[in-house]
Image: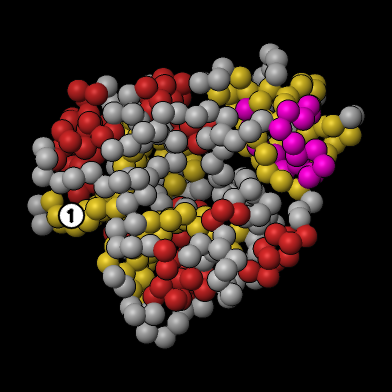
Amino acid sequence: MSATSALKQTPLHAEHVRLGAKMVDFGGWSMPVQYSGIIAEHHAVRGNLGVFDISHMGQFFAEGAGAAAWLNRLLTNNLDRLSVGECQYTFLLNNDGGVIDDLIVYRIADARYLLVVNASKIDEDFAWMQAHLDPGVQFENHSEHYAGFAVQGPKSAQLFDAFFSGQYSRPARNEILAIEIDGENYYIARTGYTGEDGFEVFCPAGRAVKSWNDILGKGAAFAIKPCGLGARDTLRLEMCYPLNGSDLGADTTPIEAGLGIFVDLQKTDFIGRQKLADQREQGVKRRLVPFKMTGASPPPRSHYAVFKGGEKIAETTSGSLSPTLKAGIGMAYIPTEFARINEQIEIEIRGQRFPATIEKKPLHRPNTATN
């Protein structure tokens, strides 16, 4: 068996091949990195509409009278703030406050929650949560049974209206709609990983191909493009959204990553809380910050050395050429004394150092008005 054939495939694999996508190994999954080209797909999402296959991501369901209390003990954000149909971004931490995963929790019924987790963390997340499961909570991994699509771009609302012809009202930002199509359960959330307006759709795996082609068909009127992981990365990087495994990991905390807004220390008990409370009180030694190259240079990538005053102070965690800004951009954990907006640094690329400036988040601010 070849290495390629050993990779996991989403229900849309044959569709990607049919559309001429370039397939790559992404955490053990065969996924499209691009179709027409990363830059064209990036601009499609910023200007019109794009659709991504996110079927590789995991879907867990937690249910029961004690589900909210159990999840609150495992996650950093506060589920008590969620009404039915709302969602929140949050973190699953280890005992030392390091990030196991970043995820979104949707409250889909009074005592039922959908958790969407990163593909590379499905097994680890489920095992960790299962090991800490409270009695009376039903917790199931349905990842193999679901497919997912991310429809992103300023014309997303128009596509929603065209698709449903007024049958359903659009969910508001960070809300989720549970509906039936041909007797099958669909979840449609007003969420995304690009900074643009958009919807993430989760449906039974057996409905994936029809739903994907229906989206492309209806979306043709709005110049929709199928998009791959390459554009997904440049889009999220312009927004300074972290990528788990690159910008987040077991040796980093949400406080260091500048994501303390998604940590509720008013909760007196959740795994990893003490480390985060100490960091909030005492400060941190490093911070995850974005940077932009200030002159012509090759694009930065991850694990490139960062210099200040001739001394190496860090390594980049992410980097790319920004199609919107037409400049190299990235992120790095910088010592706190240098982690200031407008601070001048240098990135070593192919043995040569190029100037860069620490910037304010996000690096690009789209018009994200939703209705």
In the figure, 13 relative to 180: above or below? Answer: above
Q: Which residue appears farthest toward the right when viewing the image?
A: 310
> Which quadrant of the structure image shows residue 76?
bottom right
Quick one: quadrant of the C terminus?
A: top left
Q: What's the residue at 76%, 54% (across, down)?
A: 284
Tell me the amino acid under the disc marked 1. Ile
The residue segment tinted magenta is 329-345
Q: Is residue 289 visible?
A: yes
Name the residue nearer the viewer: 237 or 146. Answer: 237
Residue denoted by label 1? 179
Q: Is residue 162 above or below residue 74?
A: above
Tell me where residue 135 appears, x and y as whole percent. Answer: 42, 86
Q: Residue at x 68, y 70 (%)?
A: 274
The percent position of residue 104, horizontal first and vertical second, equals 43, 55
Residue shown at 70%/59% (left/top)?
280
Query: For the view shown, which residue lies furthest in the bottom direction?
Result: 135
For the image, the number of numbered tags is 1
